[in-house]
Amino acid sequence: MTRKKKTRSLADKVTIRTGRRKDYKKWRHDNPDQVAPSRRFVAKKQQQRKLQAVRKLARQQDGQNIAIHPDKEGDNPSGDRS
């Protein structure tokens, strides 16, 4: 006797007559309020976004500063200003 493969697919949890993929797609299109990501998935994505923001902030702080618009007049190498 073979065991049924475990799946996280939402399609298996939906009870529709044929169980075919196109029928599930149609049902999902007709009932958008019943289709939502799981809490586990939402929490995982929130955590990933937080980590991504922390890493980005750390990269920005570690980077070197570039004086694009120098405030001092002595920084002008061409000496055009008098």
Image (cartoon, rainbow, N blue to C red):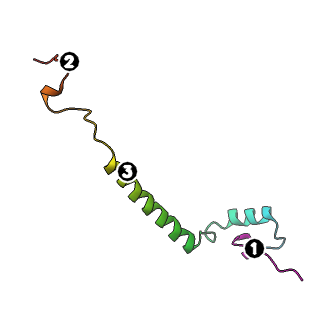
Left or right: residue 29 versus residue 61 is right
Q: Which mark is residue 34?
A: none
- The residue at 69%/62% (across/down) is 29
Nearest the viewer among 28 and 8 is: 8
Quarter of the image where one finds residue 15 = bottom right
Residue at the extreme bottom of the image, as rendered: 1
Mark 2 or mark 3, earlier in chain: 3
Q: Which mark is residue 59?
A: 3
Count of marks, rendered view: 3
Q: Which residue position is annotated with label 2?
A: 78
Left or right: residue 13 versus residue 43 is right
Percent x, y for residue 73? 13, 27
Q: CA distance from mark 2 to mark 1?
A: 71 Å
- The residue at 31%/50% (across/down) is 61
- The residue at 78%/73% (across/down) is 16
Left or right: residue 68 versus residue 80 is right
Which residue type carries mark 2? Ser
| Numbered range of the magenta stretch | 1-14
Closest to the camera, between mark 3 and mark 1, is 3
Percent x, y for residue 56? 40, 53
Q: Which residue position is annotated with label 1?
A: 12
Residue at the extreme left of the image, as rendered: 82
- The residue at 13%/18% (across/down) is 81
Nearest the viewer among 25 and 72 is: 72
Q: Residues within 10 Å of mark 3 (few under 14, many from 20)?
A: few
Which residue type carries mark 1? Asp
Closest to the camera, between mark 2 and mark 1, is 2
Percent x, y for residue 39? 55, 74
Quarter of the image where one finds residue 67 = top left
Specify the quadrant that holds the C terminus: top left
